Amino acid sequence: MSYYDILLKHKTLSSEKHFQSFSPQDVEQAIHREGDDPARLLALLSPAAEGLLEPMAQKAHALTQQHFGKTIQLYTPMYLSNFCENECSYCGFNARNPMPRKTLTMSEVEKEAAFIASTGIEHLLILTGDSRARSPISYIKDCVEILKKHFSSVSAEIYALTEEEYADLARSGVDGLTLYQETYDEQVYDRVHKSGPKKDYRDRLDAPERAARAGMRAVNVGALLGLSDWRREVFFLGLQARYLQDRYGDVEIGVSLPRLRPHAGDFKEVITTTDRNITQIIMALRLFLPRLGITLSTRESATLRENLLPLGITRMSAGSTTSVGGHTLGDPEGEDVSQFEISDPRNVEEIKAMLVSKGYQPVMKDWMQL
């Protein structure tokens, strides 16, 4: 059974009918029992759980300490190209947005990599727009050849690939994949992805499993909160993470919880996900899947990231920029070339100092390719 088959079994899930059916007693039972029964995740995400966030926090904190200790892995994103063939309503790189487009040269990749490495970062996430013409697999592999000299781990957040292409990237030195489904609601997905390769819902949904089969060490999935009802989105995200954990025990499975941020374009249909909602989401996922990696990026404010640390977070970005070559090239004067606005602008040293002050160990390197 594929994950799509599992998703179809729950296709009629609705906030009114399913999430509203849980009582506080149901939530208490879900907090204190173990297991990855989907009904348990429904209870933990339900409105009734909003009145039980404190016991959820205590359990989430204990589970995080048990499985991860007081460590936070740090990474930095590096944008290689912003050329894109997709018309995604919510993204600054939308092919119809009139913005300067650029793909880094190899010398620019070297310069950007050297700068990021000088901050002590060992885990790098490379990103491109969805354009096989402007950032083909051959180009990405050439970049990775340079990046391997500077970083112990290179992950990729790029367009969906075939299984053989993921295997090719893995052989070249890419050890992790980040790929967001954006929304699990197939109708919303079709509406916000107006055209381009990314419009194929099923191809994107199956891509993380293709990467896991191809030999990626780590696979990170996510939903872009704000496109559809957050409870449904996180339920399906949790089930996808469980599906991957169950079938690929040797692959490190993680999730990200990005919320829509201001960006170039005119997308105005944002469905609010509050800070309190994000708190409940993180704790629900931690209780449901205790070994799950959970990333909170610089899309969120410094204050919120610090407050959520004890509740399940295992990875954080630091020193982020969302423009191509943003660490060393700067932005064209008067032009918005970022994918979205970040909310926590602190550099790597500032994030490390914050973690240490709160009793956490910033982890710069926890793996390297032999």
Image: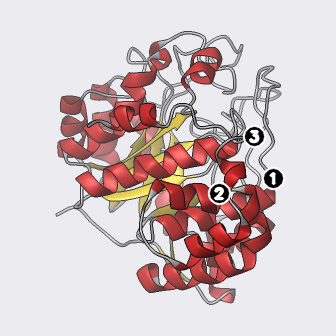
- Quadrant of residue 106 within the rendered picture: top left
Q: Nearer the viewer, residue 248 or 337?
A: 248
Classify mark 1: residues with Cα within 10 Å, few (<14), some (14-19) or many (20+): few
Q: Are marks 1 and 2 in contact (CB under 8 Å)?
A: no
Q: Given the image, on which type of amino acid does mark 2 rest? A: Leu
Horizontal and vertical percent for residue 159?
42, 28
Distance CA(mark 1)–CA(mark 2)? 14 Å
Residue for point 56% across, 31% down:
12
Tag 1 or tag 3, which sits nearer the N-term? Answer: 3
Residue for point 44% across, 79% down:
68
| Mark sitting on residue 274 | 1
Q: Given the image, on which type of amino acid does mark 1 rest? A: Thr
Horizontal and vertical percent for residue 283?
62, 68
Q: Nearer the viewer, residue 78 or 341?
A: 341
Distance CA(mark 3)–CA(mark 1)? 13 Å
Q: Is residue 302 above or below residue 234?
A: below
Horizontal and vertical percent for residue 69?
47, 85
Q: Are marks 2 and 3 in contact (CB under 8 Å)?
A: no
Tag 3 or tag 2, which sits nearer the N-term? Answer: 2
Quadrant the N terminus occupies: top left
Q: Given the image, on which type of amino acid does mark 3 rest? A: Arg
Q: Is residue 232 above or below residue 12?
A: below
Question: Exactly how many numbered labels are in the figure?
Answer: 3
117 horizontally vs 102: left or right = left
Q: Give the residue number, with chain letter if any, for mark 2.
A: 45
Q: Give the residue number, with chain letter if any, for mark 3.
A: 261
Residue for point 30% across, 68% down:
367
Q: Is residue 171 above or below residue 72?
A: above
Mark 2 against mark 3, which lies toward the viewer? 2
**Can the viewer see residue 221 in this picture?**
yes
Horizontal and vertical percent for residue 121?
48, 65
Q: Secondary structure at mark 3?
A: loop
